[in-house]
Amino acid sequence: MGIVLDSSVLIAAERAGKNPRQVIEEIAVSLGDTEATLSVVTITELAHGIERADSGARRTTRERFLKELLREISVEPVTTAIAIRAGRIDGGLQAQGQRVPLADLLIGTTALELGYSVVTQNVRHFEMIPNLDVKRIL
């Protein structure tokens, strides 16, 4: 069993001054030695944060974190199977009056397709995705 890391975990780590290797090692210790990966959507969210940095120093720190992260962990694409599954889940949830933001839906569906859990600091959206194992890390 493995885990897909949500951007909330990575953003909190970067803000705390940790590097990607430290984050991955801490999670491995906390959850047991398990395979960790990212959704390509998480890369989009982190790149978004780089552009929104409020200073040149902050931007540089975020860029360095993302570059180091990409050297440390694999990144899963959004495949056709993931897209179909996400669309079906989204349709079912909306029919019940629930809405999960597209980014979280794709990250969660990536985990489902892999048979993995999602590790996040923001469980609210992920818990709405049926059959998804959600692990909260503070």
Image (cartoon, rainbow, N blue to C red):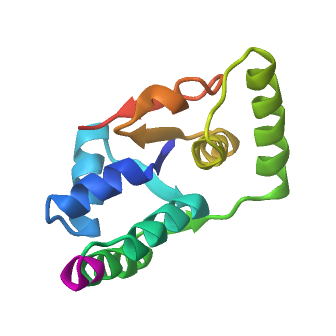
Residue visible at 66% across and 29% down? 99
Q: Name the residue nearer the viewer: 22 or 99.
A: 99
| Number of numbered discs on residues | 0
Q: Residue at x 78, y 59 (%)?
A: 79
Residue 73 image-quadrant placement: bottom left
Residue 82 in the image: state x and y as whole percent: 76, 49
Can you say whether 117 is above or below 37 in the image?
Answer: above
Q: Main secondary structure of the magenta part?
A: helix
Query: Is 132 in front, or is 89?
Result: 89
Left or right side of 51 for 106: right
In the picture provided, is 77 more to the left or to the right than 5? right
Quadrant housing the C terminus: top left
From the viewer's perspective, is residue 94 above or below residue 64? above
62 to 81, vertically: above or below: below
- In the rendering, at what x and y percent does residue 21 appear? 26, 67
Decide whether residue 56 is among the magenta residues: yes
- In-image side of 13 versus 82 (left or right): left
Residue pictured at 23% horizontal, 46% vertical: 29
Taking the magenta stretch, the answer to whether it contains residue 58 is: yes
Magenta residue span: 55-59
Is residue 119 placed above or below 89 in the rendered structure?
Answer: below
Task: Point out the residue furthest to the front here.
Answer: 54
